């Protein structure tokens, strides 16, 4: 998997402003049903906002790491309880990233 440049992350952050969180992760953490929802949603969307309702920083970071690994996506940004991830479609990407 390629690594996103800072410019590409900035581009994706600007695209994510208008998005609403599609997946909510609550105090029960990352359940199988949430993972299934994540996989189904990543089939339809390249850029995704996820809301994580967990206050403890370490626990939230573990969930973010699991989400990134499970979805095979790039972490674009974390602001408060909102996480933005990106994974391009293999055949026909909808979001064309800047080259550098």
Image (cartoon, rainbow, N blue to C red):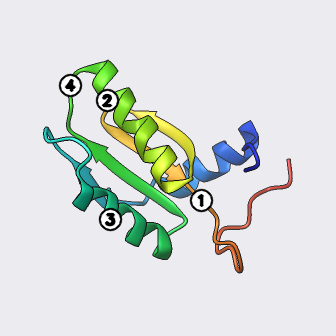
What residue would you read off at disc 2? 60
Residue at the spot 25% in from the left edge and 56% down from the top edge: 32
Which secondary structure lies at badge 3? Answer: helix
First in residue order: circle 1 vs circle 2: 2
Measure how far apart labels 4 and 3 are at the Cα level: 24 Å
Measure how far apart labels 2 and 4 are at the Cα level: 7 Å
What residue would you read off at disc 3? 36
Measure how far apart labels 3 and 1 are at the Cα level: 16 Å
Measure how far apart labels 1 and 2 are at the Cα level: 21 Å
Tag of residue 22: none
Which secondary structure lies at badge 2? Answer: helix
Residue 40 % position (x, y): 39, 72
Left or right of residue 95: residue 25? left
Residue at the spot 49% in from the left edge and 55% down from the top edge: 71
- The front one of 9 and 72 is 72
Q: How many marks?
A: 4
Mark 1 residue crowding within 10 angstroms, few (<14) / some (14–19) / many (20+): many
First in residue order: circle 2 vs circle 4: 4
Measure how far apart labels 1 and 4 are at the Cα level: 26 Å
Tag of residue 87: 1
Which secondary structure lies at badge 4? Answer: loop
Measure how far apart labels 2 and 3 are at the Cα level: 19 Å
Q: Quadrant of residue 83?
A: top left
First in residue order: circle 1 vs circle 4: 4
Q: Are marks 2 and 4 in contact (CB under 8 Å)?
A: yes
What residue would you read off at disc 4? 55
First in residue order: circle 4 vs circle 3: 3
């Amino acid at each position: 998997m390629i690594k996103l440049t800072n410019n590409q992350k900035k581009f994706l952050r600007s695209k994510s402003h208008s998005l609403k969180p599609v997946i909510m992760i609550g105090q029960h953490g990352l359940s199988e049903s949430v993972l299934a929802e994540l996989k189904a949603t990543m089939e339809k969307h390249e850029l995704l906002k996820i809301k994580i309702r967990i206050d403890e920083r370490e626990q939230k970071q573990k969930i973010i790491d699991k989400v990134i690994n499970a979805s095979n996506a790039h972490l674009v940004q974390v602001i408060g309880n909102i996480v933005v991830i990106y994974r391009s479609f293999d055949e026909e990407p909808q979001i064309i990233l800047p080259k550098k």
